Amino acid sequence: RTFSLTSKSPTEIIMADNTDANGTVATTTTSAEGNTQTNITTMDQDYVPLDDKNNNDNNNGQDINTNNNNNNNNDQKDQSKTNQNGNSKQRKAARWKQLNKKRKDGRRQKFAKDGEEDDNNDDNKKKKMKKNQNEWKKDYDAEKLPHSGSFANETMQKLFGVDIDAPLSSSGGEEEKGEGDNAATATTANNNLDGSVDVVKENEIVKKVPKRKLALLTSFLGSNYVGFQINDEKRTLQAEIELALYRSGIISKMNFGYPSKYGWSNSARTDKGVHAAAQVCSLKGEMIFHHKDDLVDDEPGQLDAMRLKVNSYLPSDIRVLDFGRVTGGFCARTSRDKVRYQYMVPSFMLCSREEVRAAFSMGEEKDGETETTAEASDEDAIDPEVLKKAGEILLQHRATPEQMERLKRGLKLFEGTHSFHNYTRRVGADNASAMRYILSFEPLDPILVPGGGADDEEEDDGNPKQPDQQWIPLQVVGQSFLLNQIRKMVSGAVDHARGAVSEEKIVESLSKQSRMKVNVAPAQGLFLDRSYFELYNKHKVKNGQKNDGVPDRSELDWVEVEGEDMPAAVRRIEEFKNEKIIPHIIDEEVKERNFLKFMYSQDILCKHGIYGPIDDGNKKWSTSKKDSAGTAG
């Protein structure tokens, strides 16, 4: 290939007189005007003159040999240094090895003399490590078992005779039954990273069922359960609700029996026999109606369908009133601002001590024969005839305006921040958890219940029906409550209303310097009325202003507001309270007479003064948070 370069100055061109190693040939010519023209011809790169190639190869070979010799010399020097360092390290390691062996031999000889085995022996160390690993693995496997208070545990199933009917799939799909049979179509599920679930049917991905954080509103009667909180080998309300959620498919089979896996939390814990009109729980559940044709874009409709399905698996004394979508960080316990309880007090509890003693003394004689007096027997062994005659007298009592005023003043004493160590158990005065804040505590207007509930009709033995009975509802609102706190406050306020204890004595009981015994009112009259989430709702409204006025989640509006229409969930709360809870409390008193027994034990059996001081003696009261944790009621 040949090309030309033209330059006005010959010095700007580098001349090549001979062909170089690259095969380039340059020829220069100068014109009469002084211009210089250079023709450069470039040959193929493979072309190299033979003589030049031999010369270059010889020179390169000499250079390589020289470099190799230098490298060999350097390697020998480095190897010499490495050997010296290596020998030094080896000598040190050998010395340490000998010292360790000498120490071990000395210990073995020492323990051999005493007839004991050396725990520091390598073999023993391995055995000990293996033992620890096995114990850790055993503990870890134990944690993998379902909760001992859940019906997922086989012991609970055998104990209460519960047959677990597994749902269609672990993803919570609807049960699909063939025509003419009850066989459910077998399916499996694959969990995705986004929380959704792929429902697999015959090796084919059908649909995704998403998981969402939900708030559950429930009402229940607590008479047949040992409390709400799940408890080892006990029939609790939480266990019943969990079983219904599992059977309906909202909780997967993988999570059934492990409340922590689906993020379970409840706004309040109730004691044995305590009811609730509006208990709120939170969990992460599966939207089982997400792909239903007529509910695809109707999330409220999906939630309502879920409510109906769960209720179909619940006993009649437990109802789910509503489901609500909440934020991922929502917790029913920590997001609750305050809670409201209601206690139903029969008006005869306002009778004075003299009136109560007179009523029970009426049953001491019968048909001219002297009967055992009520004072001679305990509460459970009281003569039913004595209890019946006393009830006929006390049920006719009606609260007077003076008694209602004293009751109102007595409840008012508990409002504000006080130390309630005398109104709970296992909590000392120096425990910070004893301090609680009561927003309000007041009586409502008395109500008259005709006929006494369940015994409206005459019984087979010809006993007449129960007389009309007056009840006084008490409402208390607070941030949180201790174990038995509400029932003890009710007992104190009632004692003040009937003149059994002075106002100064109640004020003294709220002081940290006092230690007193306070009676506990029966649990049958107490129920959880409302849970408030005002701060959570406020954040939803605030976030809605950023989203063109549309909140990212619905508000938990489960509290009645005067002058406004009740939402559907609030209407269900009021219906369950007025049709289930209050009639149940009244009927239970007619059958079991728990309040009459309480008055009998307090005014007849009790030998010490009410609000009397407690002699601590050598008894030590716990001040730990663990011991102070309790439940309302």
Image (cartoon, grey):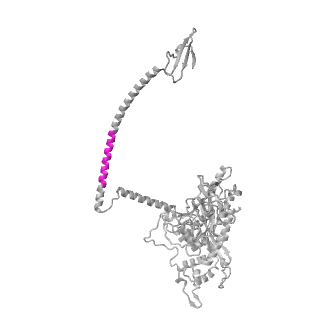
Closest to the observer: 18 or 297? Answer: 18
Q: Does residue 589 appear to the left or right of 129 in the view shown? A: right
Residue numbers of the magenta segment: 83-104
Q: Which of the 4 quarters of the picture holds residue 159?
A: bottom right
How many callouts does the rendering have? 0
- Above/below status of 356 relative to 535: below
Quarter the N terminus occupies? top right
Q: Position of residue 328 (x, y in %)?
A: 60, 55
Main SS of the magenta part reads helix
**Residue 440 can be seen in this image:** no
Task: Tell me residue 228's x, y (percent).
Answer: 57, 67
Q: Quadrant of the C terminus?
A: bottom right
- Residue 139 seen anywhere in this rendered image of the structure: yes
Q: Position of residue 82 (x, y in %)?
A: 35, 38
Residue 95 sits inside the magenta stretch: yes
**Residue farthest top in this picture:** 32
